[in-house]
């Protein structure tokens, strides 16, 4: 039989258990902390003349988080964001061509979670090299045979190109804006300039500081003169050991040049072709090569010719 004075004690115990359960359910239990490996993201545009990348060891950083047990326990790395604004990088600390510097990361997480002090991510800051390039006009499609769209006015006609190294900058052949000559320019049009490499391919390694160039037509279509010239066989480079390689035929071996009479008069009686690497050639093959066409002229038949190569094994 329960003693009369035991009832209050039992009631207090029951109430305490109830309050403990209530606190655990509503408030998530006591505070706790844990470490998360969180990816670091970059935002913003680096200061002019510099390139900023994350150091390979700072792709993710360990971040301590603190909060109610039930919240912290369920946290995932993607629930916490670590962002570095590269626009605020202290470039005064960059010595030489490249330096590693530490930067503050802005960290955000769910409500009720506190971010603990963390190791700063490391950035690789590279001092860029720059050079000026005149902008040229390239045609998306060829004008009708025997005609040209005349001339264009570009504003600006010179742009600054940035690269991480002098080697990347030296690989740029020219900067161009692509124009469709079949569409009349009744008003100025803003076009994005593109850096073209010596291999006649768009470059993804450099940055043009001028985002757009305004293009105006200074004159409309006018008659052009044409001239037939021969096509020289390409230079064969890196000939394979144990094999003789020679050019059997160039198709076509003559092409039609179209352009201003003064430019045509200065053109020799032939066009050069880009060199061919034949190091992996072991049997007869047909390759396509580009023609080296001077500025101001175009080839009516197109910019490429086919070359039949003949391969003979040496005895």
Image (spheres, rainbow, N blue to C red):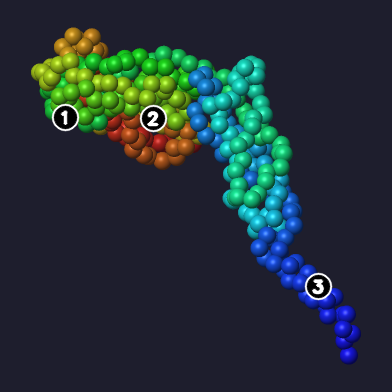
**Disc 3 packing (10 Å; few <14; some 14–19; many ≥20):** few
Q: Secondary structure at mark 3?
A: helix
How many numbered marks are there?
A: 3
Which residue matches tag 2?
Answer: 201
Q: Where is residue 173 drawn, in percent x and y?
A: 39, 20
Which residue matches tag 1?
Answer: 183
Q: Secondary structure at mark 2?
A: loop
Decide which of tag 2 and tag 3 comes sooner along the chain: 3
Instruction: Give the residue at x 68% y 44%.
Output: 115
Q: Are marks 1 and 3 in contact (CB under 8 Å)?
A: no
Q: Where is residue 301 drawn, in percent x and y?
A: 20, 29
**Disc 2 packing (10 Å; few <14; some 14–19; many ≥20):** few
Q: Is residue 298 visible?
A: no
Give the left or right position of residue 183, taking residue 199 as reference. left
In the rendered view of the protein, which quadrant contains the N terminus?
A: bottom right
Q: Where is residue 279 drawn, in percent x and y?
A: 47, 33
Which mark identifies residue 12? 3
Give the left or right position of residue 11, taking residue 85 as reference. right
């Amino acid at each position: 039989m329960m003693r009369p004075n035991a009832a209050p004690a039992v009631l207090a115990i029951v109430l305490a258990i109830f309050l403990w359960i209530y606190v655990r359910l509503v408030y998530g239990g006591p505070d706790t902390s844990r470490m998360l490996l969180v990816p670091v993201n970059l935002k913003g545009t680096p200061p002019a003349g510099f390139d900023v990348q994350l150091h390979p060891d700072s792709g993710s950083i360990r971040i301590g988080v603190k909060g109610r047990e039930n919240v912290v326990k369920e946290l995932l790395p993607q629930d916490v964001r670590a962002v570095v604004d590269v626009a605020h990088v202290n470039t005064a600390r960059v010595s030489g061509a490249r330096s590693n510097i530490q930067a503050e990361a802005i960290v955000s997480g769910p409500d009720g979670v506190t971010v603990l002090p963390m190791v700063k991510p490391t950035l690789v800051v590279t001092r860029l090299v720059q050079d000026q390039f005149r902008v040229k006009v390239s045609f998306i499609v060829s004008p009708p045979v025997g005609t040209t769209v005349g001339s264009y006015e570009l504003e600006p006609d010179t742009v600054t190109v940035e690269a991480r190294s002098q080697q990347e900058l030296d690989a740029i052949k020219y900067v161009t804006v692509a124009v469709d000559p079949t569409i009349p320019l009744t008003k100025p049009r803003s076009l994005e300039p593109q850096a073209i490499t010596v291999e006649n391919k768009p470059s993804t390694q450099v940055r043009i500081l001028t985002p757009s160039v305004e293009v105006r037509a200074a004159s409309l279509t006018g008659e052009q003169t044409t001239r037939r010239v021969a096509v020289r066989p390409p230079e064969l480079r890196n000939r394979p050991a144990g094999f003789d390689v020679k050019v059997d035929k160039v198709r076509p071996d003559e092409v039609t040049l179209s352009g201003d009479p003064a430019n045509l008069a200065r053109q020799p009686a032939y066009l050069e072709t880009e060199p061919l690497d034949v190091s992996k050639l072991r049997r007869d093959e047909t390759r396509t090569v580009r023609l080296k066409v001077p500025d101001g002229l175009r080839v009516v038949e197109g910019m490429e010719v086919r070359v039949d190569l003949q391969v003979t094994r040496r005895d």
